[in-house]
Image (cartoon, rainbow, N blue to C red):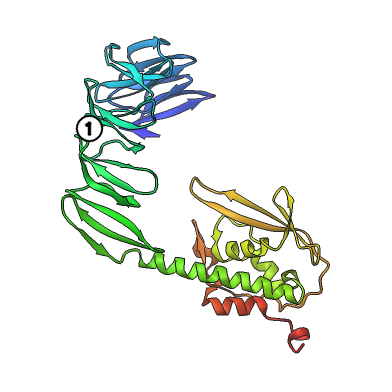
Amino acid sequence: MDAGGYFQYYEGNKMGIKTADGDVVIPAIYDFVALLSDDLFTVTEGEYTAYFDVAGNIVLPFSNKYESYGNFTQGLARVMTNEKWGFINKAGVEVIPPQFLYADEFAEGRAIVRNEEELHGAIDEQGNLVVDYWFPLLTNFENGYAKFGDLKTWGLIDKTGKIVVPQIYISIGRVYRNKVTVQVLEGEDYKEGELTIGGEVVWNNNLEHLNEFNRKKKEFAVACEQLVEEMYRSGCPCEYERFRDFIQWNQPVGFVDQELLFSAFMKKLQHLGNNLYRCEHCGACYKQKWSQYSAFLWVLNVTVSTAGNVINRGAPVPATIPVALGFYGYGIEKYNDKYDMQDIESVIAYLTKKSDAFSSQ
């Protein structure tokens, strides 16, 4: 990783720092070396921590006086002992004694701290509490403001702790030139606008595509449940080749239609444990697993582990398959040739189409 032209590198299981030109600043002989922060590298070896400058010189020698050491920001580094946090300066002097249940790094002259009641406030660089302990959650200050909230709704305070934006928004972006993007939830619809701090919100329709998708998703989920119920009245969904093909998925891309269809189907299946589900009508068993393909991408993979005792009544799978909601993740364009976006009714009709041998029955 890169920070200011410096890179972490490994030799075996040891870490060091190089410049962009490949010159070694800190040899790879330590357990961990943090990226450059406030012109210093935090270096850990066993239970000991030291701070190095950009020339590779030791500024503060290895020590285990504290149980945990943070990176320097604005001339101060957080340290922890006896489960309490405080701060040292670049001379190693303890300038704010450990007293907080938790303390974050300094940003814009403020550090977020937490007390025994699990409430957050903020201190200045002298350790004075300048924002009282009022907030269940409080983020670092950025561009003069910090977000506070409870994971459901958010507001903004200034550096004195004054609430400048009330806690009514489900999302608040970064403040830029006294403006910030906010979102609210009205009923089942999301709404976005640009708020001028101290002024009003100018709303837009940027999230209408999301609202439309959510409405369609809800409609498709209901249609899937009705489809599964109808199929079980005359047999089971496993008898339809298109249904079996549709719910089976083992790709590194999310498939919304498949997830909703299998979720509706799963409600009618017998849970055998270990993510295994059985159709009691025909005995078919399905293995389902949420697989992680990236930090933010989880995909529902479904495979048939045991084929059921069925007579295939459904029409065969064609070259192009209709979908109502589509895919998410990376590389979804490679599915464009095989899958065709259509309306919900077309997808349901596709799944329920019988083979010629049964179409007249």
Q: Using the image, determine if residue 211 lies above or below residue 63.
A: below
Instruction: Point out the residue furthest to the bottom here.
Output: 360
Q: Position of residue 100 (x, y in %)?
A: 35, 22
Can you see residue 318? no
Amino acid found under the numbered disc labelled 1: Glu
Can you see residue 302? yes
Comparing 205 with 271, the one in front is 271
The residue wearing badge 1 is 108
Q: Position of residue 130 (x, y in %)?
A: 22, 28
Count of numbered circles on the image: 1
Horizontally, is 248 left or right of 214 in the view? right
Name which quarter of the figure residue 213 lies in: bottom left
Q: Residue at x 77, y 87 (%)?
A: 361
Q: Position of residue 114 (x, y in %)?
A: 35, 28
Q: Using the image, determine if residue 103 lies above or below residue 219.
A: above
Q: Residue at x 78, y 85 (%)?
A: 357
